[in-house]
Amino acid sequence: MKKTKAGKAPRKLVCLETYWSDRQVQAFRERSVRPFFEGLAAQLEPPLAIAHRFMDSPAQLAAYTRRREGLLWRDPETFDTPVYYLSFHGSPGRIHTALARIGPAALCRAFAGWGKGYDNLVYFGACSVFKGKRGARFAREFLKSSGCRAVVGYITDVNWMDSMLTDLLFLRRFYADPRPWTNLRAIHESVLADFAPARTLGHVLHLK
């Protein structure tokens, strides 16, 4: 893996997502963040390339992310992907799939070393992952283990639409910025300043 050069982030995003309707026992209803990202892709030039997979167990997560062995590691096209977006239920330091809870140790193992080769961040599109002392401790541990430049997420239980709009606003400004890694804090602060729901939901950025 090679270090990315300072400048615009590559127009790539990897999204891992739970089957939301399975947990709610609604087989004929399917909800996903993918259409929102496809809408964002059309607003960028060049367009945003999106890799999207559903996953529901720690084993599946490791199959995608495990260093050197996971699909995302072995696929050379993912090596400069700047954003890994995790779309799940959540609680402090954990994500919840339709089938399992994945705790801080498993998450740290899953992304261990991912930021050591090039600049990237992990975006937790989930409720309350960074809430309180437990959430803040997880952020520190994850950044240390992964080597990623940042983690982004929430300190409250979030509303689906307001959080999705917050995420899209952050990502739109991130990908459009000529120096996003230099300006990460400014990008985050601009979202809080311009979109009141982001402040209400406790949208947070933790930097390495």
Image: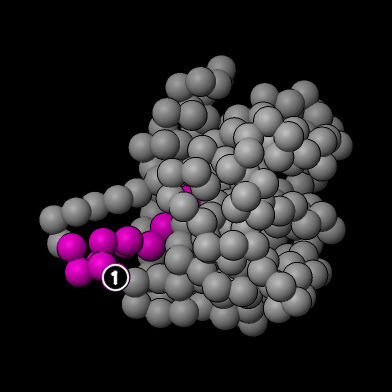
Image coords of residue 73 (percent x, y) = 58, 58
Within the image, what quadrant is residue 171 found in?
top right
Depth order, front residue of 149/173: 173
Q: Is residue 56 magenta?
A: no
Image coords of residue 120 (percent x, y) = 71, 49
Looking at the picture, the colour scheme in use is one colour
- Magenta segment, which residues? 13-26
Depth order, front residue of 127/93: 127
Depth order, front residue of 50/66: 50
Query: Is any atom of residue 78 visible in this view?
Result: yes
Q: Residue at x 60, y 53 (%)?
A: 201
Disc 1: which residue = 23
The residue at the far top in this view is 45
Q: Residue at x 45, y 66 (%)?
A: 89
Image coords of residue 13 (percent x, y) = 54, 42
Q: Is residue 25 magenta?
A: yes
Image coords of residue 15 (percent x, y) = 48, 50
Q: With 103 as the anchor, is 71 left or right in this view?
A: left
